[in-house]
Amino acid sequence: MNIYSRKQQWKWILLVVALIIVFTSLWYTNKLVKRIADDERVKIKLWADAVQRKAKLVKFTNDLFQKLQEEERKKAELYAYATKQLNGDITDISFVLKVLQDNTTVPVILTDDNYNVTASRNLDSTIANNKDSLKKELEVMRKNYQPVVIDYYRGKKNYLFYKDSRLFNDIKVVFDNLIESFISEVVINSAAVPVIYTDSSQVTIIEVGNIDSAKINSPERIKATIKQMELQNVPIEIDLGEGHKNYIFYEESAMLTQLKYYPYVQFGVIGVFLLIAYILFSTARKAEQDQVWVGMSKETAHQLGTPLSSLMAWTEYLKANGTDESIVNEMNRDVMRLHMITERFSKIGSQPTLQDEDIGVVVKNAIDYLKQRTSKNVNYILEIPETEIHAQLSVPLFEWVIENICKNAVDAMDGKGELKITVIDIPEGVAIDIADTGKGIHKSKFKSVFKPGYTTKKRGWGLGLSLCKRIIENYHNGKIFVLQSEENKGTTFRIVLKRG
């Protein structure tokens, strides 16, 4: 098993482990969120029940307050009736006097039909003994309640004005404090949930608590927020008596909402961190690989230089000593080939100079050289357009790419089959397709074949296609990829270059 197969397996293993960790974490977090949500709902229920009980107390107090108010009105009316009886023809004066004496709480002022004060009761002495103060008190009473009219004989009328007793005012203060305390308990709730307290219209807000002001800064947002709360929980109805009903809307706390999304944010941050780390490590690894390529290429070119010079000298020596010229010429061709290989390696270590070249001519020269050095059982088919197609090339390096791909194709066909090379004029530039009838490549390996060390040969280094990719993409700004492949039927590689 080669390094890339093991690498692929490790990738799948790590992916499965990562998914298990993610799903386990999400499962546990969701379970924890559900538990907290259940606890919060219990708290909200307890708080809602407490609010309901206090609402009933408020209603009861309000009803009691109304009854007291009605009783004080009746006391004032009874007092007026007794006053009328006292000034009229009555037989049981003791009952009338008792009614007048029993009124010890309700402040009253009796006037004639011209609103001149004729009598008063249950007023502070500082008011009762001062005419100006008495008049001011009379004005206050006239504004608060309608007077009780006392009809005498012959159309003569007196008016009895009254106001709330001190006891009634004390109860009212207690009632107002109870209402204020009730609203405070709604707003500052033990469950710390966002709440909105509205009137019967469910639009006008009385108080809010634990809620972002941005959600209630306009009528439209208020309506939307209340609607959202209503969808989450049934609003609590507060009956204040006499048909007056208010409503409490509430939703889940901000902490619970944040906790729901926390794992996703956490995995997102971790993912970004891992992505940055991967990019940094990949960049560092690529830079290291580049340095290895450059160092290996320069060293190879350097090592080939000395024996190549020696071989060139020996061919000259053989030629001078009358050796068969055909043999010397063939040796010269191989020496020149070695010289070209040395030049290729030297160019790998530095940015090559690109020149405008006819693609068809370069491809034909490379194939002609290969034909003489491969099996006669390989049928080469070369399809080149009649019109010239130019591109910016480094001829030694580009020919190296063609040779590498073709040699791999011959090996894949076991030295027997058809090798078709086609130059195609395409909108993006020019494409060179190299198709063989060999063993084919599995689809999952289309990208792996270009990685250093990948090989299917027992004695291969797995550097040929990696060099091809580097030459085409890094030096020629082109593309090289597996266009199509089918196992036991063949493979087609495509090279795409920009037009010159």
Image (cartoon, rainbow, N blue to C red):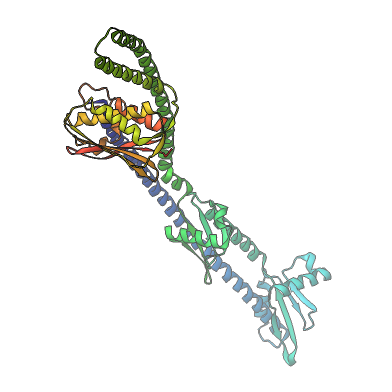
Residue 285 position (above or below residue 439): above
Question: Which residue does the image show at 38% across and 39% down from the upper left?
Answer: 389
- Side of 272 where 170 appears, left or right: right
7, above or below 78, in the image: above
Q: In terms of depth relative to the viewer, which is nearer, 302 or 204?
A: 302
Q: Residue furthest front?
A: 322
Q: In front: 414, or 242? A: 414
Q: Quadrant of residue 149?
A: bottom right
Can residue 5 be seen here? The reply is no
Quarter of the image where one finds residue 491: top left
Question: Residue 452: which quarter of the image?
Answer: top left
The spot of residue 95 in percent (x, y) is 64, 79
The answer to whether residue 230 is visible is: yes
Numbered circles on residues, count: 0
Residue 389 lies left or right of residue 139; in this view the side is left
Q: Residue at 74%, 92% (x, y): give it.
A: 154
Instruction: Judge left or right: residue 116 versus residue 245.
Output: right
* Foreground pick, 172 / 383: 383
Q: Residue 299 appears at what percent x and percent y?
A: 37, 14
Nearer the observer, 23 or 50: 23
